[in-house]
Image (cartoon, rainbow, N blue to C red):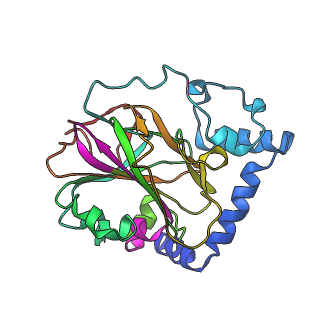
Amino acid sequence: MKNRLSVLLQYILPKQAITAIAGKLAHYQGGELTTSVIKWFVKRYQVNMAEAANPDITSYTTFNEFFTRPLKIDARPMAQADFICPVDGAISQFGVIEHDQIFQAKGHSYSITALIGGDKALAEKFEDGHFACLYLSPKDYHRIHMPCDGTLKSMTYVPGALFSVNPITAQGVPGLFARNERVVCEFVSEKHGSFIMVLVGATIVGSMATVWHDAENGIINPPRTGKTKTWNYDKKNITLKQGEEMGRFLLGSTVVMLFEKNTLQFNTDWQPAKAIKLGELMGN
């Protein structure tokens, strides 16, 4: 009953307004107040600051500066594998894309065509391929890295709702990841063909950013115009190596990855809800 009420409240609450306010507060330079909030957050969510390149809580001038903190160079050794996990997080779901459908939770699936913003021709590349959905909790490192080498082909911002993306909401909101705000990044790999990384927004996720976007700090949203927008990078030759940073969440969310048919086999140790770290073996 409690879980059902939590989901129902999300339909009622002004999620866009809450998120806009949270984004402004996360950018606010509040001195001792900011430090106090960060200290509370670290204690509340048991954030491991020993892994951070800068472990000094008092040195962060904004909450977002703390939240997107880089890790020490040796904090995440990279597995020697064709595919590595691109984030710290938990495995929500993974498996085969059944024609155009991805399994979300018991009783719920969603369309990859809808997920990537309605591009049916692009979606067809991934029919009967594989997907992985990775959930980043508040305590996790919130930069996103490359699972394998890839050349950027396009990026599409898709406006949408801002439901929470935690496991409870995934079980209660149909088509959650295809209805929330998201940024769809299309890559091509010489060795592995096309693959897609979808950065999914959520309640209180102030914005998402990529390393190549030409806005300040790579931030894609805000502004939230309510319109789908696509950037084409065919002529820019933006190539990122495995393990290289590709983006970040300003407050946490989920990454959904799509791979073509016969591209990979997932690590057999994977299971839903299992924690996984950046750089760990994902599949071969």
Find the residue positioned furthest to the top: 74
Count of number-bearing discs: 0
Question: At 72% across and 26% down in the image, what residue appears?
Answer: 56
The answer to whether any part of residue 111 appears in the image is no
Where on the picture, by quarter, is residue 150?
top left
Residue 176, horizontal then vertical, whole percent: 42, 68
Find the residue positioned furthest to the bottom: 12
Q: Is residue 181 left or right of residue 214?
A: left
Find the residue positioned furthest to the left: 262
Give the residues in magenta: 172-195
The verdict on residue 225 being magenta is no
Quadrant in which the C terminus appears: top left
The verdict on residue 192 being magenta is yes
Residue 147, horizontal then vertical, whole percent: 35, 38
Residue sitting nearer the eye, 180 or 157: 157
The answer to whether any part of residue 81 appears in the image is yes
Work out whether 65 lies above or below 156.
above
Residue sitting nearer the eye, 109 or 27: 27
Find the residue positioned furthest to the front: 235
Residue 156, horizontal then vertical, whole percent: 46, 60
Question: At 22% across and 36% down in the image, what residue appears?
Answer: 191
Q: Is residue 249 left or right of residue 186?
A: right
Where on the picture, by quarter, is residue 268?
top left
